[in-house]
Amino acid sequence: MTTESAPAPHTSQATAVHRSASSIHPPRSVVRRGTAPPGPHGISWRGSVMGLPAAGLFAADLLAVALALSLVPGVHWPQLAFALLAAVLSVLHTYRGLYRPGLSPSALGELPALLGLGLLQWYGTAEVLTAYDSRYAVDGTALACAIVVQSLLACTGRAVVHLTRRACAARRPQPALVVGRGPVAQQVTAALYDHAGYGLRPVGQVDPGHVDPGHVVPQPDTAQLPVLATPEDVSRAVIQNDVRHAVFTRPPESAPEAAALVGLFAEHGCRLWLVDGGAAEGITHRRVQGTDHLWGFAVQPLHSGPHQPFARTGKRAMDAVLAAAALLVAAPVMAVCALAVRLFDGPGVIFRQERIGLDGRPFVLLKFRTLCPVDEHESATRWSVALDRRMSFTGNLLRRTSLDELPQLWNVLRGDMSLVGPRPERPYFVAKFSHAHPGYQARHRMPVGITGLAQVNGLRGDTSIEDRARFDNHYIETWSLWQDVCILARTAGSLFRFGGS
């Protein structure tokens, strides 16, 4: 198994150098401005660039609140005020994304958001304090002064944190892989080499398509970056170089090979970024929104589902609690369904089938049996049995009311599935759809679910696979616990609109 060598930017002559993927290391022949020599193999910079700034930003925000309380004249604030302001601030700023990591955060760019959220924070807290005790009523002028003072102080503190982060990033950039090919990938690699303040040090380039072993992108450089051709090469490179970041130069949904890498990087705990190279390639529409950039390329975090530990824990906790409660509430209904299947359709109440879950891992899905397949081949490869004449009245009723899916609550409780997520499919169809529909494979970066955004929008049964993949990927990119709650509410509202799949 070999990898192709791609030229690193700004040196003299490109030559083809073939290396084993097991020997992937950063080029040592090129010293960049502001870039410290790479640390010894095995030393992790995890959190050194992206982890601490969030705590620093929160501390700057709290300090701004404390100073605003003391600097606004003529107002007697109770001790409860700071606790309320800090609690509201943490919720609003987290919701607005003011603690998310960025490659080029700007304190001035954050100032409008600080002012707007400060308005909600202070006026909301003032109303609570006034309702608690009328002695703590504050006039509008004092509140306006407090909002402006806090926002300016928070902006100043955040500027210090951002400058400190860039200085630390330049000294200790984290290993990164650039995913993509062509001019944009080369320009992004060059920008990361020349501007270490972004905190990323390229150690390889991933070509998600077919790699011609003799092909080298001509650039004036004697140093070579390895080009990784297979998932095995990528996984080996991530482990050996302690890679913490992957920079995609095209949306992963644009190619099945790139989409498959999302789950691989997520499994290794890498943070993903999407760079918009549309303008560089003559594409007029923009895919990336926001003010963050990488040397002029718009960039945003590429979410692989609930990647933060708190988010994963929150989603799993909600699944476990709700699934356990639902199993208890639905136990009488499930008993009636099981009895009906046994009496009218014979033995074998539970139907078991292999499905593909998170990161492409198989699991056994449980359902009430509505039809007995001829053999395992039919079970694995037949797309729909909704109109099969062999289905009894009982099986048809269970399907149309979706009651046949109640045993999947046990899958949720075991951790095979989530309540909300992309619907799991059989291995045969996963392989088929991944080849035919770019972006289908990317659905597996999120735990599969009993219901999902595609299903509540009517995409179930014999409907467009491309549309389903689009809705599923949109759900993953915009995931939140509140979105899960909304989807569950919409699902509950449509349970008895006979449809089925």
Image (tube, helix red, strand yellow):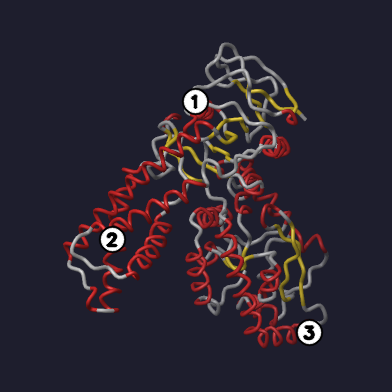
Nearer the viewer's eye, disc 2 or disc 3? 2
- Which label's residue is closer to the chain start, 1 or 2? 1
* Vertical placement of residue 217 versus 454, above or below: above
- For the C terminus, which image quadrant? bottom right
Distance in Å between CA atoms under marks 3 and 1: 72 Å
* Vertical placement of residue 404 versus 37, above or below: below
For the residues bearing labels 3 and 1, Cβ distance under 8 angstroms: no
Specify the amino acid type for callout 2: Leu
- Which label's residue is closer to the chain start, 3 or 1? 1
Distance in Å between CA atoms under marks 2 and 3: 70 Å
- Which label's residue is closer to the chain start, 2 or 3? 2
- For the N terminus, which image quadrant? top right
Helix, strand, or loop for circle 1?
loop
**Residue 112 place in picture, x, y as percent:** 29, 50
Name the mark on residue 342. Answer: 3
Answer few, some or many: residues within 10 Å of disc 3's Cα (few below 14, many 20 plus, some between 14 and 19): some
Residue at image location 50% in from the left, 70% down from the top: 485
Residue at image location 58% in from the left, 62% down from the top: 421
Observer-nearest residue: 331 or 305?
Answer: 305
Name the mark on residue 69. Answer: 2
User: Would residue 41 be found to the left or right of residue 317 on screen?
Assistant: right
User: Would residue 453 be found to the left or right of residue 283 on screen?
Assistant: right
Helix, strand, or loop for circle 2?
helix
Name the mark on residue 34. Answer: 1
Residue at image location 52% in from the left, 47% down from the top: 51
**Residue 381 place in picture, x, y as percent:** 74, 58
Specify the amino acid type for callout 3: Arg
* Vertical placement of residue 27 versus 384, above or below: above
Specify the amino acid type for callout 1: Gly
* Vertical placement of residue 399 versus 115, above or below: below
Observer-nearest residue: 37 or 427?
Answer: 37
